[in-house]
Image (cartoon, helix red, strand yellow):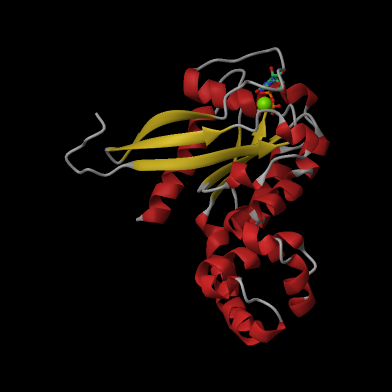
Amino acid sequence: QEEDEGGEEYLFKIVVIGDSAVGKSNLLSRFARNEFDSNSKATIGVEFQTQVVEIDGKEIKAQIWDTAGQERFRAVTSAYYRGAVGALIVYDITRRSSFDSVKRWLDELGSMWTIHGYVWCKRHEVLKSVFDFQHFGVLDSICCAVCLKYPVYLDSAGSGTKGLVERALVEVKVWLTHCDTAVARMLVGNKCDLDNIREVSRDEGKSLAEEESLFFMETSALDSTNVEAAFEVVIREIYNNMS
Ligand code: GDP
Ligand code: MG
């Protein structure tokens, strides 16, 4: 099964993020195992589920990551985002505060490829003094990009290499723009079965999605509405981005 004639293997890492109790774990269990759990459990205990999806006759493995409750403590680490090529940002249509949090989750997602920047992150102070970047997410990203592209300067970054880092920075800015669009992002308004106690209208969700260039769907992990569709749109978009 693993060895197709084509020999191509697709493995997409997709992260599910959003406030606690919006239904992330249930969306995943509905998609991967067609199960729903009415008891809220902060931790399901697995880091991710792998689901095989077929697109254009190609077998694609979607490795979908669940936060396992860390979002409660705002402790979702960069390891969680590492290598992700797709994201579902989930809110609960019956809880406005979870919708208001979407921007914060998008910000965090925007700095997801800080991953390789550990070495550089130790040097925050150096870069900070040279470029005076306020936003730590952006700063991390730049550290990361400079580190990847100009590894030689890692050990010698300081005032002496200012020119080199500045040159790298110009390229990094271009790269930042690309990276942003390379992650397939879907805004998900979950619990649409609870229309009678809705606090966020469909139109509000839709316009936020348009504003932020995200796909948008309302779902219900309870009655299965759009669950498969939401994941599949993201997977298809990743696939399209690659080819
Ligand atoms: P997470 O913290 O984001 O992973 O949220 P959970 O998946 O643990 O769900 C939180 C609570 O919301 C649980 O009690 C679920 O049963 C409930 N829930 C999740 N999805 C839905 C849904 O689509 N409709 C309804 N009515 N309840 C849901
Ligand atoms: Mg959960």
Which x, y percent locates residue 182?
51, 57
Going by the picture, which residue comes out furthest to the front? Answer: 155
Please identify the quadrant where the C terminus is shown.
bottom left
Going by the picture, which residue comes out furthest to the left? Answer: 5
Residue 92 visible here: no
Which x, y percent locates residue 225?
56, 25
Q: Residue at x 77, y 39 (%)?
A: 74
Relative height, residue 194 to residue 101 (above, below): above
Picture quadrant where residue 179 is located: bottom right
Which x, y percent locates residue 187?
63, 43
Which x, y percent locates residue 229?
49, 33
Q: Residue at x 35, y 42 (%)?
A: 10
Picture quadrant where residue 147 is located: bottom right
Going by the picture, which residue comes out furthest to the right? Answer: 97
Residue 201 visible here: yes
Q: Nearer the viewer, residue 154 or 167?
A: 154
Please identify the quadrant where the N terminus is shown.
top left
Relative height, residue 30 to residue 218 (above, below): above
Q: Nearer the viewer, residue 7 or 128?
A: 128
Picture quadrant where residue 57 is located: top left
Q: Nearer the viewer, residue 8 or 167?
A: 167
Q: How many marks?
A: 0
Assign ligand 2 to one image quadrant.
Answer: top right
Position of 147 with respect to 23 (left or right) is: left
